Image (cartoon, grey):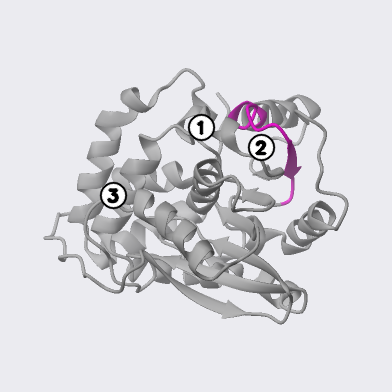
Amino acid sequence: MLHVYNVCGIALGLALGAAVPAAAAPPSTQGTRAFTVTVTGAGTRHMILIPGLLSSGQVWDPVVRQLSHRYRLHVLTVAGFAGVPAVAGPLLPRVRDDVIAYIRENRLERPVLVGHSLGAFLAIWVASNAPDLVGPIVAVDGVPFQPALNDPSTTATAMEPLARQMRTLYGSMTPDQIEKQTRLALGRMISDPAAVAVAASWARHSDGGAAGQALYELMTTDLREAAADIRSELLLIAAAKAVESTPDALEAVRRAYEAQVARVTHHRVIAATRALHFVMLDDPEFLLSAMDEFLRPGTTSLPEGE
């Protein structure tokens, strides 16, 4: 079995260590969007950055610091995560639609979409639903259907019972429980203990109901076929530090990730061999170099199927 540490791994870590349930807080009706946005940067080209499950947009700070002179950066934090009030009802479809509306309302010309984990899933969903609106896509250790990374034969229907369990579990947990169990899981996803502590604090200030709903939707939505509608170039970066660094093991990782985006006409899969799941924190130099090469004018036209 290919062991890939991703957002589903966080969920399973929580499940193994869950304590006494507590009542979930009711969702807020904050704003009109299912995310907040911080806009910085002096560039003329636009880039939208979407974090993963339980994460603040601050997770992108290493990228923002380096790219703010070249891009206008729109950094999102999803509703219910890292202190942003939750919203009622389905979450990820609403984030998808709100990102599309945000691009249209602000007249962003084919912005670059960058997403981590769940955020990468959302970037792929936005690009498959509105292919004419978006530019190049950078998916940082996030794919169209995460459960299939470890079990290629699984389906969204097969994941339904576990997804329901995870949704109920998250909704029942106290902030202390979410922080404690997420901290344990993050130890396998971030190398620096100080960064683990910061990410765990984001989890503590997240809404369990929102996290559970997002995870349910992530586990039961398979975008591999829909990704065929993407017209932009896509760079998929696989976190591979946790994998044995042999040619065979790395090739197995590449094949698993390649299968996820096989239907995207112009794509490339590369491995970050010195980074765990949070590539932007573990190896920002590699991520920035890969993004720079991919996004350099005249270099984003990838050969078909690469």
- The magenta span reads 258-274
Query: Which class describes the residues within 10 Å of circle 1: few (<14), some (14-19), or many (20+)?
Result: some
Identify the residue at image location x=44%, y=52%.
Answer: 185
Of the two numbered discs 2 and 3 in the rendering, the one whose residue sits closer to the viewer: 3
Disc count in the image? 3
State the residue position of label 1. 226
State the residue position of label 3. 213
Quarter that holds the N terminus: top right
Residue 15 forms part of the magenta stretch? no
Which badge, 1 or 2, is on the more N-terminal residue?
1
Query: Which class describes the residues within 10 Å of circle 2: few (<14), some (14-19), or many (20+)?
Result: some
Of the two numbered discs 3 and 1 in the rendering, the one whose residue sits closer to the viewer: 1
State the residue position of label 2. 243
Which badge, 3 or 1, is on the more N-terminal residue?
3
Q: Is mark 1 on a helix, strand or loop?
A: helix
Q: What element carries label 2?
A: loop
> Which amino acid type corresponds to the residue marked 1 in the rendered image?
Ala
> Which amino acid type corresponds to the residue marked 2 in the rendered image?
Val
C-alpha distance separating marks 3 and 1: 21 Å
Of the two numbered discs 1 and 2 in the rendering, the one whose residue sits closer to the viewer: 1
Q: What element carries label 3?
A: helix
